[in-house]
Image (cartoon, rainbow, N blue to C red):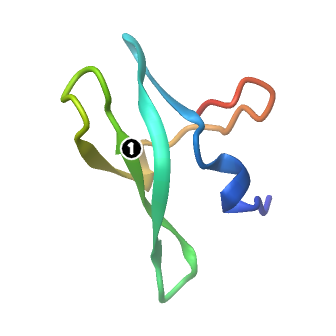
Amino acid sequence: MKKNLNKIIGFKIKSKNGISGNITDFLIDEENWKIAYAVVDVGSFFKGKKVLISNTFFDEIDLTRGTF
């Protein structure tokens, strides 16, 4: 299913131990036009730092809750 990436910016990333951060951007694989990484602001854990999360760690997008 195709999604508008602008609608997903700001979604929260869920981890096994709770919420890990917010999506601030994406890196796209130019060969197949799929999301390669999500840029995630991890906020309180690393105070203002951003990390890349590989698409291999993505689960389903929950549009009603705004989470990955």
- Residue 29, horizontal then vertical, whole percent: 45, 78
Specify the farthest residue to the bottom. 31
Is 62 positioned to the left or the right of 53 in the image? Answer: right
Q: Nearer the viewer, residue 19 or 29?
A: 19
Q: In this rendering, is residue 28 above or below 64?
A: below
- Residue 26, horizontal then vertical, whole percent: 48, 62
Q: In this rendering, is residue 44 above or below 54?
A: above
Identify the residue at image location x=32%, y=28%.
43
Choose top left, top right, bottom left or bottom right for residue 68.
Answer: top right
Estimate how packed mark 1 is, as few (under 14), some (14 to 19) or many (20 or more) residues with alpha carbons within 10 Å: many
- Residue 66, horizontal then vertical, whole percent: 68, 31
Identify the residue at image location x=77%, y=35%.
63
Q: Nearer the viewer, residue 36 or 41?
A: 41
Is 7 positioned to the left or the right of 57 in the image? Answer: right
Question: Three-letter amino acid code at disc 1?
Answer: Val
Q: What SS does tag 1 mark? A: strand
- The residue to which callout 1 is attached is 40
